[in-house]
Image (cartoon, grey):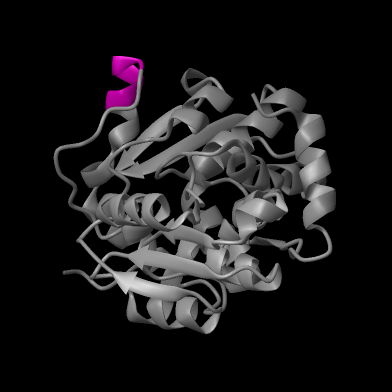
């Protein structure tokens, strides 16, 4: 299990290169909820999401002999950019496999950060299979988007910052795909403030966690249908599920209509903070 001390050490490691993003009040959503709502603006993070935290922490821990053949990753866009940026920052070549329908701006940005990009398959899981095969063939190190302790520890620094920036926080709502972010946030928050409620949100059309929790181990979905491409992960990670007790977290599934409603609500916010999904396909 990732410890608070380990997460604090990771925060110190990331401090020179990762931004401490602000928390801002969101009046429109606060009015709808009847409670004060603040946004942890990871869209203002390097590359536009929280992903560089885990990617940099993972890659920076690689010994010299593992860096020779570079790193490889699979992603619909955010992890791709995080890996490309982190690898380039550390002077390591990177290759990224992305689904054919990934958002064009994210493909362009990933290449701009220095990665060689290959488009394959229609889902993150298809891209991950291709990345795994590439790693076996070339000796490149696979930087998994969520299923590694170093990645979870890096994402956990988001939770650490929330506790420092808003000590009175009562509930933290976290999007959940493979589970790296929610596992990290829950690990540090529950250890320091066990009374804080963690709510993990999945798209109803890609909700692999409830099925997996019921089975007691990660279970792959037969199919997915969601506009939320960034969290469209068909099988949760083993590492996240062992990092914190998932049953201590409230799980919520959001239907397509609610996802669209959330986007409309986001449009009422300042235009600088939100990260739109890929267009429907």
Give 227 or 240, whichever is nearer the viewer: 240
Q: Is residue 216 above or below residue 230?
A: above
Whether residue 97 appears in magenta in the rendering, the answer is no
> How many numbered discs, if any?
0
Tell me if I can see residue 167 in this picture.
no
Residue 174, position as x, y percentages in the image: 51, 44
Check the picture and name the quadrant holding the N terminus.
top right
Helix, strand or loop: magenta stretch: helix
Magenta span contains residue 212:
yes
Where residue 33 appears, as percent x and y from the top left, is: 49, 47
The residue stretch that appears in magenta:
211-216
**Left or right of 13: which side holds 204?**
left
Residue 183 quadrant = top right
State the quadrant of the C terminus.
bottom left
Task: Identify which residue is drawn at 20% across, 69% down.
Answer: 280
Q: Which residue is nearer to you in this view: 148 or 215?
A: 148
Residue at left offset 41%, top offset 42%? 178
The percent position of residue 273, horizontal first and vertical second, equals 56, 71
Q: Position of residue 233 (x, y in %)?
A: 32, 46
């Amino acid at each position: 299990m990732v410890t608070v001390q380990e997460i604090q050490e990771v925060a110190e490691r990331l401090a020179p290169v990762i931004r401490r993003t602000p928390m801002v009040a969101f009046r429109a959503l606060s009015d709808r909820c009847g409670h004060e709502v603040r946004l942890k603006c990871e869209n203002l993070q390097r590359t536009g999401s929280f992903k560089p935290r885990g990617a940099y922490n993972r890659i920076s821990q690689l010994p010299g002999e593992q860096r020779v053949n570079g790193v490889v990753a699979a992603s619909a866009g955010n992890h791709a950019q995080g890996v490309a940026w982190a690898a380039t920052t550390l002077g390591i070549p990177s290759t990224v496999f992305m689904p054919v329908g990934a958002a064009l701006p994210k493909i362009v940005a990933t290449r701009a950060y220095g990665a060689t990009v290959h488009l394959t398959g229609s889902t993150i899981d298809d891209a991950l299979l291709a990345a795994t095969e590439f790693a076996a063939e070339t000796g490149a190190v696979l930087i998994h988007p969520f299923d590694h302790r170093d990645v979870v520890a890096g994402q956990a620094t988001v939770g650490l910052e929330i506790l420092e920036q808003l000590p009175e926080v009562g509930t933290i709502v976290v999007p959940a795909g493979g589970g790296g972010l929610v596992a990290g946030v829950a690990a540090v928050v529950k250890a320091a403030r066990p009374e804080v409620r963690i709510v993990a949100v999945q798209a109803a059309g890609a909700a692999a966690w409830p099925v997996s929790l019921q089975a007691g181990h990660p279970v792959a979905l037969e199919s997915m249908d969601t506009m939320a491409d960034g969290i469209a992960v068909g099988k949760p990670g083993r590492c996240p599920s062992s990092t914190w007790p998932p049953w201590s977290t409230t799980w919520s599934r959001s239907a397509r209509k609610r996802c669209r409603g959330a986007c409309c609500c986001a449009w009422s916010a300042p235009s600088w903070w939100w990260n739109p999904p890929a267009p429907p396909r």
